Amino acid sequence: MANTAQTSVELPIPLERLCPEGERARVDVQALRWHLEASGLHLGRGQDPLQLKGGLANLNFLIDVDGQWAVLRIAPHGPLPPGAHDRAREHRVLSRLPDAYPLAPRSLHLCEDPSVLGAPFQILEFRAGRSVVGVDMTPMADIVAPGQVLTEAMIDLLAGLHAVDAESLGLEALGRPNGFISRGIAGWTKRGIAAAGTSGCLTLVGEIGAWLEARADRAPKNPPTLLHCDFKLDNIVFAHDSARPVALLDWDMCTRGEPLFDVATLLSYWTEPGDPDCMHRLAQMPTAAHGFPSRAEVLDNYIARTGRNRDGFAVLRVLGLLKLGVVFLQLHARWREGAMGENARANDFAALGEEILAFARDVASEKYV
């Protein structure tokens, strides 16, 4: 089905937030309409789903449901890594978490039947605002000292999430906190070996996995909390007129475990001016400029804010980089299989993943922090 924008409809976001018409993924609008009507929901405004920019795997579309703007979030088609892009997990979390953590958008509907749109999908509450995507700080041009302001907002968001009582929301059975770090080391090492194949990455993955396994018992041991597991700047929506967060997005990996793992994930994306070229090509956050603090300062600030134990954080730091490098190897494999469509950056993902793994090895040897 064609995804044609209806210019007579006033959209809640700037047109530049939409994928160009020729690059939009196709959605079977009639199948979506029939499915929603069978569930008591109605696709409205005569508006086909409009694909939003951003994201390397999940597809997100702006739609109207029962007269309210919402987000249609579709998992990638085809086989996926274990636990990845889990629509059912995200729906379970976002059906409850907004009651205690209002920055989480509520999940309104889940469809696990891939025959409807080709993959499981859900309907999420839409939150209007602005986001920093990649290294482009233009959307926040009105903010004074944006690096410091946005960093403080991120630390506050994480501290707030890690203070939520999962049991009060009926999420006490989410994930398996016992052995969380050891399973993460084993799991990401195994995925890395599978994704590396016979390439030069194989040795890197083996070295990093062995380093982590030997030090797993040194990792921080704080009481488990809810974890986002992909916490970074472009998953935050800010108010149009300030740096006040209005939403935290992308909850499909949410679980319970060591809270400092979320900090390590954030810092795996955090580029500093003296980092190797791969971290600058990563271009996930604008932290190498605009007055952002260092990774060490971010960790210091989080610890000061929460009082948690940081002993052994280097284990989580290296694990976060292992995970990131392996994800790019997996994305490159999916791109080569034709599962990601056209993506100008995807050809570099294999080299980027390998270089991030080399950076992880350097962090393990204390060449970088």
Image (cartoon, rainbow, N blue to C red):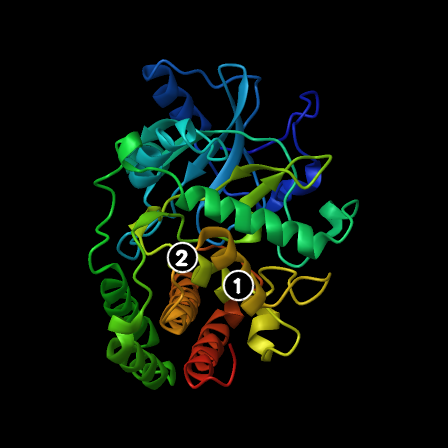
**Count of picture labels:** 2
Above-or-below relation of 68 to 71:
above
Q: Along the polypeptide, which appears first: circle 2 or circle 1?
A: 1
Q: What residue type is disc 2 on? A: Arg
Front position in the image: 110 or 348? 110
Front position in the image: 187 or 157? 157
Secondary element type, mark 2: loop
Residue located 47% across and 47% down the image: 159
In x, y percent, where is residue 358? 45, 82
User: Cα distance, mark 2 to mark 1?
Assistant: 10 Å
Q: Quadrant of residue 314 in the image? A: bottom left
Q: Is residue 347 left or right of residue 206?
A: right
In x, y percent, where is residue 119? 34, 41
Q: Is residue 127 left or right of residue 229?
A: right
Identify the mark at residue 300; answer none if there is no mark.
Answer: 1
In x, y percent, where is residue 294? 61, 68
Secondary element type, mark 1: helix
Residue named by callout 2: 308
Identify the mark at residue 289; answer none if there is no mark.
Answer: none
Front position in the image: 269 or 169? 169
Q: Are marks 2 and 1 in contact (CB under 8 Å)?
A: no
Q: Residues within 10 Å of mark 2 (few under 14, many from 20)?
A: some
Q: What residue type is disc 1 on? A: Asp
Front position in the image: 278 or 79? 278
Above-or-below relation of 355 to 231:
below
- Is residue 283 in view? yes
